[in-house]
Image (tube, helix red, strand yellow):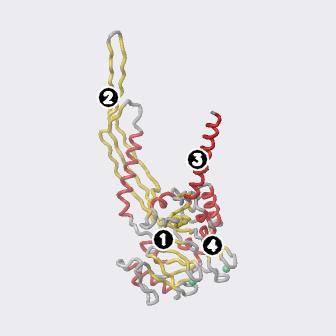
C-alpha cells in the first residue's frame, strides 16, 4: 500500500491543510495552494514512482479477499499483529500503524503521511467536511471550556497536556431516507350537558386517516468500533451544507481513521429509528380530539441513500490519577464540545469544607445571638 505526502513544488517541504484559509500551506516557505492547484500536483509516495503506486493500488482493489492490500506489502513492510508497518516518503523511517489508521505523522521526521490504500477502493469516502477550527483555536476553546468548570485537576489543562490535542477525521455513515406512511385511528369527542334533571352525553366518533411522505436527511452514525460512542455522537451535528467531495489531500496534517463498521451493521437500527420518528410525526398530525386510539400505523422506506463520510474532531485524552482515561472531543467545524472531565477531589473537599465551615460559623453566630 502506498504512503503518500504532499510536497511543496517550491521547496519540497510538507503541505498541510490549513483550516483558517482552507488552503494548503507549506510549513517551510509559507507558500499557499488552493485545492485546484493541489489536485494538479502529484503527491509524493513511498520510495517508488507514482505509476508503480497506482498499479499497486489497483492491484489491491482487484483482490476482494484483501481489500486493504495488506498482503500486497513488499518485503519492507511485513504484516504485524496489531497494525502494519509502512515507510515514510520523506525520511524512509518505519511507520507503525493500527488497522484503522488512514492518516498519521512520521514518528521521526513528524511529516504528515496518508495511507492511500485505506482511503481508496471500497474505503474511499464519499464526502468530507474539512477542519474549520485550527489547532490554536481548538486549544483556546478547550481552555475556555475547562476554566469554566470547577474541580478539574490542574494537570488536565497543563501545557504539555494541551499539546496532545489531536485533529482527527473520524469515519461516519450518513443516510438520507424517504419513508411512506399511513395511519388509521379513531378519534373521540365527548360533550356532556344538563337539562333539568337529565344529563346528556354525546360521543362523536371519527375515523381518522393520514397518509404522508417523510424525507429524513443526514442521519449520522459512528463507523469506528474503537471510537467512544458517546463522544462520536456527542460532537454531532455538523453543518452539512459545507460538505465536500472527498479529496485525500484534506487529510494532510491530521490524523484519520478508516471505518471498521459496515453499513449493514447499522442499517436496521437506523431504519427502525427513522420509522419510529416517522410514526411519531404522523401521530402528531392528529389533533382536535379528546382521545385518539391508533388502529394501524405503518411506515415503509421507499428510498435510502448512504454516504461514507469523514468528519473533523479535535480530541484530548487524559489519564486521571485513578488510572481512568478521560476523553474530550470538539466538533472541528463549529467547536461544539463534549466529554467527561476528571474531578479533582481535593478541590471538591476544600470547597465543601469551606461551605460547612461557613455554615458552622453562621450556626455559632445564630446560637450566640439567641
Ligand atoms: Zn515550500
Ligand atoms: Zn519521516
Lower sequence index among marks 3 and 4: 4
Which of labels 3 and 2 is toward the front? 3
Residue drawn at 50 percent across, 57 percent down: 234
Q: Residues within 10 Å of mark 2 (few under 14, many from 20)?
A: some
Q: Which mark is residue 24?
A: 4
Q: Quadrant of the C terminus?
A: top right
Residue identified by numbered label 3 = 356
Query: In this view of the protein, can residue 148 be seen by the observer?
Result: yes
Residue drawn at 32 percent across, 38 percent down: 294
From the viewer's perspective, tell me whether residue 334 is left or right of residue 119: right
Residue 111 lies in quadrant = bottom right
User: What separation in Å lies between label 3 and label 1 (alpha carbons)?
Assistant: 49 Å
Name the foreground residue: 169 vs 234.
Answer: 234
Which of labels 1 and 2 is toward the front? 1
Name the foreground residue: 227 vs 43.
Answer: 227
Which of labels 4 and 1 is toward the front? 1
Residue identified by numbered label 1 = 257
Q: Which mark is residue 205?
A: 2
Amino acid at each position: 500500500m502506498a504512503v503518500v505526502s504532499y510536497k511543496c513544488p517550491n521547496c519540497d517541504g510538507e503541505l498541510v491543510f490549513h483550516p483558517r484559509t482552507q488552503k494548503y500551506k507549506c510549513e517551510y516557505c509559507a507558500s499557499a495552494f488552493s485545492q485546484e492547484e493541489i489536485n494538479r500536483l502529484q503527491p509524493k509516495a513511498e520510495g517508488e514512482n507514482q505509476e508503480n503506486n497506482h498499479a499497486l493500488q489497483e492491484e489491491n482493489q482487484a483482490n476482494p479477499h484483501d481489500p486493504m492490500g495488506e498482503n500486497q506489502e513488499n518485503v519492507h513492510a511485513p504484516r504485524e499483529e496489531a497494525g502494519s508497518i509502512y515507510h515514510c516518503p520523506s525520511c524512509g523511517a518505519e511507520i507503525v500503524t493500527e488497522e484503522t489508521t488512514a492518516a498519521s505523522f512520521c514518528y521521526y521526521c513528524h511529516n504528515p503521511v496518508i495511507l492511500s490504500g485505506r482511503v481508496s477502493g471500497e474505503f474511499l469516502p464519499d464526502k468530507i467536511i474539512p477542519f474549520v477550527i485550527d489547532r490554536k483555536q481548538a486549544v483556546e476553546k478547550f481552555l475556555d471550556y475547562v476554566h469554566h468548570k470547577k474541580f478539574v485537576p490542574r494537570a488536565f489543562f497543563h501545557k504539555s497536556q494541551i499539546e496532545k490535542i489531536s485533529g482527527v477525521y473520524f469515519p461516519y455513515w450518513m443516510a438520507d431516507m424517504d419513508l411512506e406512511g399511513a395511519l388509521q385511528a379513531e378519534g373521540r369527542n365527548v360533550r356532556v350537558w344538563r337539562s333539568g334533571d337529565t344529563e346528556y352525553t354525546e360521543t362523536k366518533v371519527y375515523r381518522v386517516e393520514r397518509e404522508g411522505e417523510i424525507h429524513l436527511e443526514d442521519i449520522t452514525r459512528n463507523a469506528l468500533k474503537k471510537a467512544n460512542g458517546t463522544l462520536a455522537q456527542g460532537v454531532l451535528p455538523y453543518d452539512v451544507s459545507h460538505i465536500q467531495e472527498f479529496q485525500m489531500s484534506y487529510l494532510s496534517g491530521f490524523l484519520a481513521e478508516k471505518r471498521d463498521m459496515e453499513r449493514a451493521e447499522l442499517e436496521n437500527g437506523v431504519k427502525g429509528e427513522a420509522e419510529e420518528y416517522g410514526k411519531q410525526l404522523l401521530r402528531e398530525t392528529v389533533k382536535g380530539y379528546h382521545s385518539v386510539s391508533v388502529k394501524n400505523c405503518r411506515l415503509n422506506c421507499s428510498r435510502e441513500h448512504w454516504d461514507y463520510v469523514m468528519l473533523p474532531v479535535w480530541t484530548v485524552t487524559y489519564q486521571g490519577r485513578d488510572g481512568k482515561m478521560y476523553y474530550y472531543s470538539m466538533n472541528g467545524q463549529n467547536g461544539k464540545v463534549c466529554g467527561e472531565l476528571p474531578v479533582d477531589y481535593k478541590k471538591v473537599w476544600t470547597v465543601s469544607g469551606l461551605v460547612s465551615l461557613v455554615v458552622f460559623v453562621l450556626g455559632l453566630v445564630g446560637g450566640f445571638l439567641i
